[in-house]
Each structure stands twice: as C-alpha cells, then as structure tokens.
Image (cartoon, helix red, strand yellow):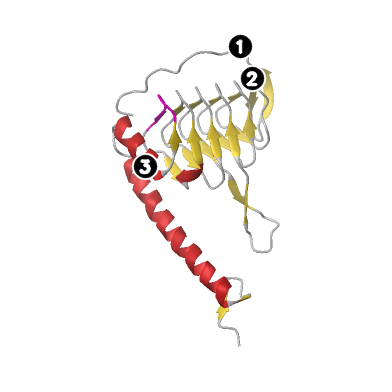
Amino acid sequence: MTIFVDRMGHPLTLREAFQKIVNRLQAIFLDFKLMLLRWVGHIPSHYFRLLFYRLSGINIGRGSVIHLWCNFFDPHGITIGQDTIIGDHAFLDGRKPLTIGDHVDIASQVLIYNSQHDIHSQDFRAATSPVKIEDYVFIGPRAIILPGTTIGRGAVVAAGAVVTKDVPAFAIVAGIPAKIIGVRKIKNPHYRLGRARLFQ
C-alpha cells in the first residue's frame, strides 16, 4: 500500500516524501524572504535598500543603484557589477546565476528570467539557464530577457523587445523576438552612469 504520492499521483518512497517536505519548507521560507524584499523596495533611500539587498544575498558592486519597487526571485543567484542602474519595477530572477556587468543601464519595468516551464514536459517542470548581461549594455523599458541568453558588451535592447537568443556585442536589437536592427557606433565605451535620483 502506497502512503505517499506526488501531485501527479506517482508513488513516493519515505525518503522522497521527506525530501519534498524539506523542499516545500525551503520554498515557504524563500517566499517570506521575497515578501520582505518587496517591502524593502518601498523604502525611499538607496542606502537602506542596498543594505537590505546585500544582506539578502545579492552581490552589488560599488556605485550601483536599484530603484524603487524592484522585485526578485532567489536573490542569492544575482550579481550586479559597479556603476550599474536598475530601474523601478524591474524583476530580477536568481534561480540560476544572473550576472549583470559594470556600467549597465536597465530601464523601468524590465523583466529578466532564467527559469521557464518546459511546455513539452509531462509534469510542466521548470527549465533553468543562466543569464549574462555584459558591461555597458542598455536595456530599454519593458524589455523581457529570457533564460539562457547573453547580451554582449555595449549592446542595446530596445523598449519592449523580447530577447530569446544571444545578442552580439554592440548590436542594437528590437522586436518580438528581438532581431538586430543596427550596430552601436561607439566601440570603446568608458562613460560612467552617474548618480541616481535621490528618492527613486
């Protein structure tokens, strides 16, 4: 007689059932932590927000800022370089490594995912892949970056674009899915993004 079954009705051994209970408790703890980080996102002080974000496990470089109302998934997987700006209402997914370089400008409401459901899987399981955004990238408002992509140094992602594959260095991409529409003229950027607005 089977005592334990998973959500698909498959039988589980005692060890498998125990591991599922542990995983569920860890997920509840993570959900609570993410709820606290969402509240932190309303604090109108870059200093205090960055302090709490660092304590939660996000690796944030010197001079970088995260604007109000940013949301996260698993902050331990997120690394942000120096002099990088993350816009308001952005979503950063750390379920696999999310690496954001130096001098990166990410506009408002950008969504960066590194996990998505496998629509061909019998149990609709998640498929995860890291995302890398190299130095001097600009990502326009409401762009979506999907799992397993690398955005090359100095590339530009236009507003509303959906990035489904790697973007070459200094390329300008736009559309759904994002396609190359041009090339950035500068090849050796060395600018700094400057200070963020005080109460944003």
Q: What stretch is highlighted in magenta?
A: 61-67
| Residue 129 coordinates in the image, percent (x, y) | 63, 45
State the SS at label 2.
loop
| Number of the label disc, if any, that sits on residue 186 | 1
Residue 65 is inside the magenta segment: yes
Left-right relation of 158 to 89: right
| Residue 46 coordinates in the image, percent (x, y) | 32, 31
Residue topped by disc 2: 170
State the SS at label 3.
helix
Q: Is residue 104 above or below residue 16?
A: above
Q: Earlier in the sequence, mark 2 or mark 3?
A: 3
The answer to whether the residue labelled 2 contacts the one labelled 1, judged by CB atoms less than 8 Å apart, is yes
**Cα–Cα span, label 2 and label 3:** 34 Å
Q: Earlier in the sequence, mark 2 or mark 1?
A: 2
The residue under the point 63% across, 15% down is 184
Q: Which residue lies furthest to the bottom in this view?
A: 1
Q: Is residue 158 above or below residue 127?
A: above
Q: How many dots with numbers?
A: 3
Q: Nearer the viewer, mark 1 or mark 3?
A: 3
| Number of the label disc, if any, that sits on residue 55 | 3
Q: In which quarter of the image is the N terminus?
A: bottom right
Amino acid at circle 3? Leu
